[in-house]
Image: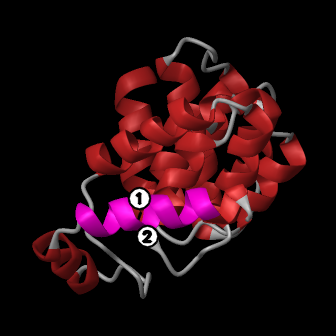
Amino acid sequence: MDPIKDNSREMRKEFFAFRNGIVADKLRKAGDPHPVMMGCLLVDVQAIAQRQREAIGDADTLAALAQELWEDTKSRECRLAAPMLYPPEMMSLEKALQWCSTVETIEVADTLCHKLLRHTPDADALFRQLIADERPLVKYTGYRLMLNLMLLNKLQLTEQLHVIVNNEAEQAQGPLANLLKDIQEEYI
């Protein structure tokens, strides 16, 4: 028996138990790309992940389970739960960059930054690399992480960052434009 596969199956059963067709339908209509979507509320995904964290306890096993869930790009709930399980102190800069390069929705980006990346040792270096990326969701993830670090007082908006944010805001569109506007209104 593979404990990682067993834990993964257990979590998927719980996602199914907390499924919400109304939420799933709204997400589909809004363009969520995940073919497997239970429509679980984020608080329910968090509770399921927390039960697994408490039951498993071991950091290596949690990291392996989180990686297994993250690799299931078809399942919204798996992608949301993975950052809630991965031990932040074990997340290397390289792995964080890998995860960020596969972010497929704003919801996944926000959850990844809030639940995991802002607590990692290399968060400062990570956001700087991400905001320099040309892929829209990767860039968004970088600025979301930057905002998370500022909210935690782990990052001060320097003159250099101020210029970067303002320059980016001039050309940004969609969710990135809204995020940069929030940063400008709050910190500039």
The answer to whether one can see residue 9 in this image is yes
Which residue lies under the disc numbered 2? 76
Q: Secondary structure at mark 1?
A: helix
- Residue at (45, 36) in percent of width and height: 50
Residue 8 on the magenta span: yes
Which residue lies under the disc numbered 1? 107
* Residue 125 vertical placement versus 2 (above, below): above
Residue 80 at x, y = what percent? 47, 56
The kind of residue on which mark 2 rests is Arg
Decide: marks 2, 1 in contact (CB < 8 A)? Answer: yes
Indicate which label's residue lies in the foreground, 2 or 1.
2
Mark 1 surroundings within 10 Å by alpha-carbon count, few (fewer than 14), some (14 through 19), many (20 or more): some
Q: Secondary structure at mark 2?
A: helix
- Residue at (30, 69) in percent of width and height: 16
- Residue at (68, 42) in percent of width and height: 62
Residue 5 at x, y = what percent? 66, 65
The secondary structure that most of the magenta stretch takes on is: helix
- Residue at (79, 54) in percent of width and height: 97
Q: Quadrant of residue 34?
A: bottom left
Q: Which residues are magenta?
A: 6-18
The kind of residue on which mark 1 rests is Glu
Between residue 71 and residue 174, name the one nearer to us. Answer: 71
